[in-house]
C-alpha cells in the first residue's frame, strides 16, 4: 500500500509540474503576442505622429518662424521685467 501511495503521489506531482509548465508556456506565448502587438502599435503611432507633423506643416507653414518670434518676444519681456522684480519694495514708487 505504501508503494501505491508513493506512485499516486508521484503521478499527482508529475501532473502538477506538467500543468505548471503548460501554464508557463501559455503565458510566454501571450507575452510574445503582446510584445508583437505593442511593436505594431508603436510603429503605427510613429507613422501617425509623422503624418500629424506633415499636416500641421501644410496647415501653418510659418509655425516655426512664428514660434521663434514669440519666444524672442517673451525673452525681451522677461529681460525688461526682471529689473523691476528685483528692485527693493520701497524703490518701486520713486
Image (cartoon, rainbow, N blue to C red):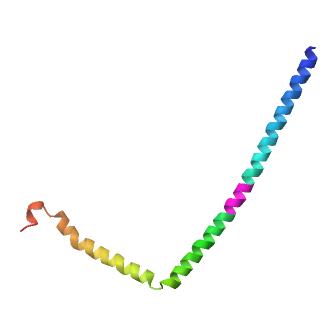
Where residue 70 sits, quadrant-wise, is bottom left
Left or right, 33 with reference to 6: left
Residue extent of the magenta highlight: 33-39
| Picture layout, residue 3 above or below residue 16 | above
- Residue 41 picture location, percent across and down: 66, 64
- Secondary structure mostly seen in magenta is helix
* Relative horizontal placement of residue 91, taking residue 70 as reference (left or right): left
- Residue at position x 53%, y 85% in the image: 58
Rendered image quadrant of residue 50: bottom right
Magenta segment: does it hold 24? no
> Is residue 73 found left or right of 13 in the rendered image?
left
Q: Is residue 62 above or below residue 84?
A: below
In reply to whether residue 35 is colored magenta, the answer given is yes
The image quarter containing residue 55 is bottom right
Residue at (19%, 65%) from the top-left corner? 85
Which residue lies at the image location 93% right of the left edge and 19% below the top edge? 4
Which quadrant of the rendered structure holds the C terminus? Answer: bottom left
Q: Could you tell me which residue is drawn at 89 percent across and 28 percent down?
A: 11
Q: Looking at the picture, how far across and down is residue 63, in whole percent?
A: 44, 81
Amino acid at each position: 500500500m505504501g508503494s501505491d501511495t508513493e506512485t499516486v503521489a508521484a503521478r499527482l506531482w508529475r501532473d502538477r509540474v506538467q500543468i505548471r509548465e503548460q501554464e508557463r508556456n501559455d503565458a510566454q506565448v501571450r507575452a510574445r503576442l503582446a510584445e508583437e502587438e505593442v511593436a505594431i502599435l508603436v510603429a503605427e503611432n510613429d507613422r501617425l505622429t509623422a503624418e500629424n507633423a506633415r499636416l500641421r506643416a501644410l496647415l501653418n507653414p510659418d509655425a516655426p518662424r512664428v514660434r521663434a518670434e514669440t519666444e524672442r518676444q517673451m525673452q525681451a519681456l522677461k529681460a525688461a521685467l526682471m529689473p523691476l522684480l528685483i528692485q527693493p519694495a520701497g524703490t518701486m514708487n520713486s
